[in-house]
Image (spheres, grey):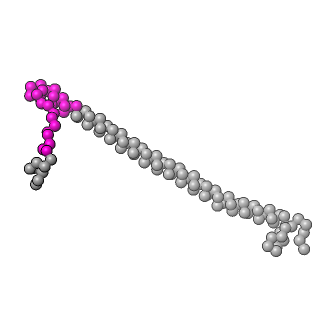
Amino acid sequence: KASPGATVREGITMSSSRQAAASRAATRRAIASGVPFMLFVAGGALVLSQFTAGTVEARDVRQKSRTEKAFNLEEEHSTAMQKLFGGDDPTAKELMLKRIPRPPPGSAEDDD
């Protein structure tokens, strides 16, 4: 027969001290498996944040170099226009940029 402070578990009687020991063991197992898992999750989040930060920095560097290149293109364009229209050469002042007229549709050149 079971004593008054004992509980029945799967047909086996356990005293309250054994029940407390089993409860502590279950708690230890949960902590022993839960703590490494939580450390793994936190470490993974840290590593991923560092990885994505490096990717974002690389993208910023690429974008910055493209922007600088665009400014250099504008500078080169203004330099070329200065050479064409504002040079000391008298013929440079006579130059004008004109659009070349297209031949009308159906002309002899289109029939090739």
Q: Residue at x 29, y 35 (%)?
A: 71
Is 75 inside the magenta-drawn segment? no
Q: Is residue 68 above or below residue 20?
A: above
Q: Which quarter of the picture shows residue 37?
A: bottom right
Q: Residue at x 42, y 44 (%)?
A: 57
Q: Is residue 89 left or right of residue 79?
A: left
Position of residue 66 measured from the top left corner of the image (x, y, whole percent): 32, 41
Q: Is residue 4 left or right of residue 87?
A: right
Position of residue 63 measured from the top left corner of the image (x, y, whole percent): 36, 42
Q: Residue at x 76, y 62 (%)?
A: 23
Q: Is residue 38 above or below residue 12?
A: above
Q: Which quarter of the picture shows residue 29?
A: bottom right
Front residue of 110 and 56 = 110
Which region of the structure is painted magenta?
Answer: 78-104
Q: Is residue 89 above or below residue 18?
A: above
Q: Is residue 88 above or below residue 34?
A: above
